[in-house]
Image (tube, coloured by chain):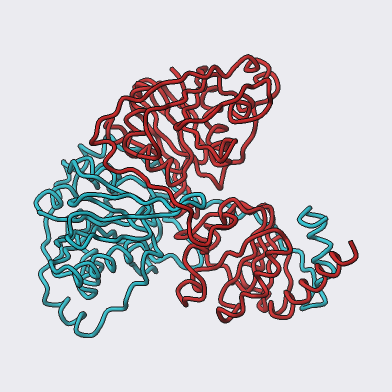
Amino acid sequence: MDILVCVKRVPTVGGAITLTADRQAIDTRAAGFTISPHEECAVEEAVRLVERFGGAVTAVSLGPAAAQEQLRACLALGASAAVLLETADGVEAGPIATAAALHSVAAAGPFDLVLLGNEASDTGDYQVGIRLAHLLGRPVATGIKAIAVADDGSSLAASRTYQGVLETFTLPLPCLVTVKEGINRPRYPSLPGRLRAKRAPLTRLPVSESLLSAVAAADIRMRALRVPQAPRKQATVLGHGADAVPALVGVLTELGVIS
Amino acid sequence: MTVFCLVELDGDHVADASLRALTVARGLAGDAGTGLAAVSFGTVSFGTVSSGTGPAADLGSYGAGEVYAVAGIDGYAPQAWARALAEITEVNGHFVVAAGTDRGNEVLAHLAAISGLPMAANCVAAAPSAPGALDIVRQRWAGLLLEEAVLAAPAMLLTVATDAVSAQPAPVPALAAARAAPVVRAVTASVNGADLVVKATETPAAGGGASLATARVVVGGGRGVGSAAGFAALEAVAELLGGVVGVSRVVTSEGWRPHAMQVGQTGTKITPELYLACGISGAIQHFAGCAGAKHIIAVNTDPAAPMMTRADYAIVGDLHEVLPALVNALRGRETQA
C-alpha cells in the first residue's frame, strides 16, 4: 500500500499570537515550527498502515525551503521519501492553489491512499483535501477518527462521530481521507528513525510563481489579520478552597444553572 | 439573487449551529435585498408555521421565505448533497451559506470544488462591499486569529463559525412578513452513482449520552486533576448540574480520558451557559474551544493561570478540595428540596 501524506509547516503558537507590524502574518521571529496536530496523526496512521500492509509512505509539503525541517521529521517517523513543493519565503498559498500544487505530486503516484489533516491549524480552510479529491477524481472522507482497511486492501471504512451518531463511510481504494487528532497517539521519533531521516531522499521541486498566482486569483484575498480582543473582564475571586463553595453555589443559582 | 442556507436538523428542530448560520444568511439577504431560502435534506415533516412547532416554525421565525426539502438521497452523502445544492441553487449569482460544522464545511467544500469557486470557512461577519464582492472576517487558528478578506466570485460560498455568532430570530416586522411563509418546496435530487460512493452508515456512538458540543453545562478537567481516577469528582458535579465533562489536551495525551472529550482547537468547540474549568491552566488552544462559553468559572491553585484571569469567576484552591465540598453542598440542597 503506497500512501501519500500531506503536511504543512506552521508556527508553534504558545501563550499568545503576535502579528507583524503590517498585520500580514504572524510574527515568527521567536517561534518554532511544527506540523498541525491532525497531520501528526495522519503521518502516524500512514506509517501504521504500511507496517501492516507493506508499501511506502511519501510525505509532501507545499512551503518554503525551511519546510524541509518538517519533512525530515516525517521521515524520522517512518516515511521513506519526501517531496517539497518549494515556494519563495513569505508566499501563502490559498486552498485552491495548495490543492493544485499537491495534485501534481498525487497524480504522479500511483498512491492507494492520500492522507491529510482535516484542516491546517493556521489557516483553517477546511477544503484542501476535498479539492484535491475532485482534481484526482477519487472519493474522499473528512474529519475521520478511525480507519479500518479491509484485509484484501480493496477498501477502507472511515468513521467519525457526529451529533452523538457514529458515521461510517466505506471507500474503495484509491481514495483520500482527512483525519483528526484522536485517531491515534503519534509515536516519538526513534534514534534509528532520526538517523535514517538524514539519509532519506528529499526532493525539492520549485513551484512556479506564475502558476501559483494564476490559481490564487480565484481564492479569497486576505487583507489583514487581527487578534480578537479577549472578551473576559477581570475575574471575580469567589474565595479560597472549600470555603468558596457557598459563594460558588450562589453564582450557580444566579446563572440559573441550579434552581 | 437569493441567499440559500443549508440547514441541519436536530430531531424536530433546526440545529442550533444552523440557526446561527441562518442569522448571518439573513443579514446578507437584508443587505443584498434578496430572499432567504433554507435547504434541508432527508425526509422530514416540516409542520406549519401556524402550528408553531417543528423546523418550519424555526425557519419562519428566522426569516426564511422558502424551504427546499430535498428527497431522493437516502442518508448523508456529502458529494451528493453538494451536487443537489448546485442544482437547486444554480450557484452563480447567489449566496450559499452553511454552518461551520463537520457537515457544513464538508458539503460546501464539495460544492466549491464542483463549481470551481472559492469558499470562505468559519466566517464571523460578512457584508457586500461592491458588486460581486463580499467583505468577510473569518476565523484562523480556530478563532485565536481573525482574517479580514475579500471574497470576489460569481457566487459566494461561506460557512459560519458556530461558536462566534449568536442565533437571533428575525425582528418582528420581518417575522410578520414571513408569517405566511415559509413556502415548503419538495424537490427530488437527481444524483449519479459516483456522487453516492461516499455515504454514511449511521449507528449510535459508543458512550452516547449528552453531546459536549451542545451541553448547557460543561465541567472541564486539566492537568490538575492528576489521574484518570481523579475525574470521579468532576463527573459527580457534572451529573448534579445536568452537564457533561470535558478535558484539556494534556488529559487525552496522558490517556486519562478519550480524545472525544477534548475541548479545544483540535477537539470540540463548546458553547455552554457555564464552563466550570478545574485544574486547567488555559493554553490558547484550549481557549479556542471554550471561548464560546457564556460564563466561565475557574478553579485552580495558581491565581495567575490564564484560565483564572480570563474567567468570570475564580476560586483559588485545589479542585480535589473544592469539588467534593461542592458535591456535598449540592446534595444537601437536593435533600432539603
> Does A37 sit left or right of B36 as displayed?
left
- Depth check: give the residue in front, A134 or A153: A153
State the residue at coordinates (30%, 55%): A157
Q: Is residue B144 in view from this perspective?
A: yes
What colour denotes chain A? cyan
Find residue A74 and report its horizontal and vertical position in percent: 23, 69
Indicate the quadrant containing the C terminus of chain A: top left, top right, bottom left or bottom right.
bottom right
- Count of residue discs: 0
Q: Quadrant of residue B291?
A: bottom right
Q: Is residue B206 above or below residue A101?
A: below
- Depth check: give the residue in front, A233 or B14: B14
Q: Quadrant of residue A94?
A: top left
Farthest right residue? B336
> Does A173 sit left or right of A187 as displayed?
left
Q: Is residue A10 in view from this perspective?
A: no
- Depth check: give the residue in front, A189 or A2: A2
Find residue B233 and report its horizontal and vertical position in percent: 68, 74
Which chain is in red here?
Answer: B
Farthest bottom residue? A191
Q: Is residue B190 above or below residue A140?
A: above
Q: Quadrant of residue B189?
A: top left
Indicate the quadrant containing the N terminus of chain A: top left, top right, bottom left or bottom right.
bottom left
Find residue B85 and report its horizontal and vertical position in percent: 37, 28
State the residue at coordinates (16%, 55%): A112
Find residue A223 and report its horizontal and vertical position in percent: 40, 41
> Does B90 sit left or right of A233 as displayed?
left
> Does B78 sit left or right of A203 as displayed?
right
- Depth check: give the residue in front, B196 or B295: B196
State the residue at coordinates (56%, 77%): B223
